[in-house]
Amino acid sequence: MTDTAWIDLALVSARPQAMGALLRYFRNLDLAEEAFQEACIRALKTWPKNGPPRDPAAWLIFVGRNSGIDKVRRQARETALPPEELLSDLEDRESELADRLDGAHYRDDILRLLFVCSNPVLPATQQIALALRIVSGLSVRQIARAFLVGEAAMEQRITRAKARVAAAGIPFETPDASDRAERLAAVATMIYLVFNEGYSAMNGPEGVSADLCDEAIRLSRLLLRLFPAEPEIMGLTALLLLQHSRARARFDANGAITLLEDQDRRLWNRPMIIEALAIIDKAMRHRRPGPYQIQAAIAALHARAERPELTDWEEIELLYQALERLQPSPVVTLNRAVAVSKREGPEAALALVEPLADRLSSYFYYHGLRGGLLKQMGRAREARIAFDRAIALATNAAEAAYIRKQLDHLAGEADASDFVQEQR
Amino acid sequence: MLYAVLCYNSEDVTGGWTKEEDDKVMRDLTAVQRKYVEAGKLGPVARLLPTTAATTLRHSPGETVVIDGPFAETKEQLLGFYLIDCTSLDEALDFARELSAANPAAGSYEIRPLSLYKPGELAP
């Protein structure tokens, strides 16, 4: 690892805490970002000579804060408008610096920073973009690449998100227990969105999408370290680890989706699975089940099965039932249907799937699963119609490639039966 | 004398390594270990899961509490340990120095002598 590489890593890992503290000082995202940027520039100058400070985050907060105050003072002179309130506020804060730097506040600082990016007033795409920019420190160019949009468009999206956040007001009061729980839930959703953006964009530029998954896992671990006794945050972390553990097995050589049961399980990332299973064990002790824990428990049952036929579909079906009770949704029912098809066959599963037609008519996986079930039942003509519908709804090349494979399969079977008939 | 070498690094940093970077660090550390293995000095080596996987049992008279998370909340976390047979503290320090040179993450290496050692019978 080169000199600058370790500095980059130290800056990235100190970023949430430092940005969180600077946001508390300046109460303004842009000012906090500029102050952090300035501190990073100084770190790049001095750290290679002096070695890394014992506590990089504290160093960055101290330097960033001073440079930010200078800037506010300069601006005050330039505009000849003494913002007395702001300045005296900063002076007061100075005296508190010592105890603030010891990290006593850092938990709420980081949560606030994450929450600012998870504010429900922001649409999902803006939450993700803002979090990647503000918390993770990805460049606008990197984020634009991940979303497959131009840099200018992404810049605009982030600017718009910041304006919305500012208008909504950043919450600076120390949260009470119920505020904290609310913020935690919003932040967990945002982290899951970041992960899904990476997970579903695997056909994007190489590496970028996996980076988003890694980033989401990093944020989730960070959140769990801050709130170590929250079973749903354990569930979230375990869920992301389990889903990401299969990254290398999810696509075949042609880039088509490989279904779970067809994946080469040797390609699954064992250390991630072991970590996730350990975290789920911890969560179970709390006996406070939630959607993330249940989804993680389902993923864990897949991970525990050495071969697809050893999968505990009965338990999986029960867990989906529990999830339906907690979070009723046609997509969850669709997933339960997969478990039902394994235990009771395609007919029973189809009976569960058909009533979802209205609500899932434009959902790729609805038509994909329906086609698969019809195919298993030998209803090739209807299967083909379902697959045709699915392919039209595919949102990426990997989904389309998978359906094309199913269609080829159907065509192959039809040819074979025609051939047999001719022989007769 | 048997020493335990306990490795404290920042999880944020080591958790931020890509798989390639992590693999490289592991290779470099294995290279350091080889000499000690060949000299018959190195005992069990362990890399620990992140502290998010940790649970702590806290015991005080009359009460036992199970707490999520590691024992100590510090900037650096105990991420692994070595058991090494050294003739002196200096030799153990040399080993720790070599490890720290092979590991790009800033960290601390606590060297703690053992009073009891049982190799155990775990399958490798």
Image (cartoon, coloured by chain):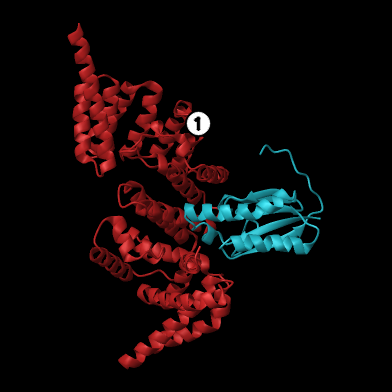
Chain colours: A red, B cyan
Mark 1: amino acid: Glu
Q: Is residue A371 visible?
A: yes
| Residue picked out by circle 1 | A306
Q: Nearer the viewer, residue A294 or B36?
A: B36
The mark tally for this picture is: 1
Decide: is A420 above or below A116: above
Q: Is residue A275 left or right of residue A255?
A: right
The image quarter in which residue A185 lies: bottom left
Disc 1 element: loop
- Image coordinates for residue B70, horizontal then vertical, percent: 62, 55
Q: Residues within 10 Å of mark 1 (few under 14, many from 20)?
A: few
Foreground residue among A204 and A374: A204
Residue A285, horizontal then vertical, whole percent: 58, 43
Relative height, residue A32 to residue A323 (above, below): below
Q: Position of residue A284 (x, y in %)?
A: 55, 42
Q: Residue at x 52, y 71 (%)?
A: A57
Report the quarter where the C terminus of chain A lies.
top left
Examine the rendering and report whether any part of residue A126 can be seen: no
On screen, residue A285 above or below A261 = below
Chain letter for mark 1, please: A
Where residue A138 appears, x then y in whole percent?
A: 37, 64
Residue in the picture at 44% in, 32% down:
A316
Q: Residue at x 35, y 61 (%)?
A: A119
Residue A19's quadrant in the figure?
Answer: bottom left
Report the residue that reaches farthest toward the top: A424
Q: Nearer the viewer, residue A321 or A376?
A: A376
Q: Quadrant of residue A320?
A: top left
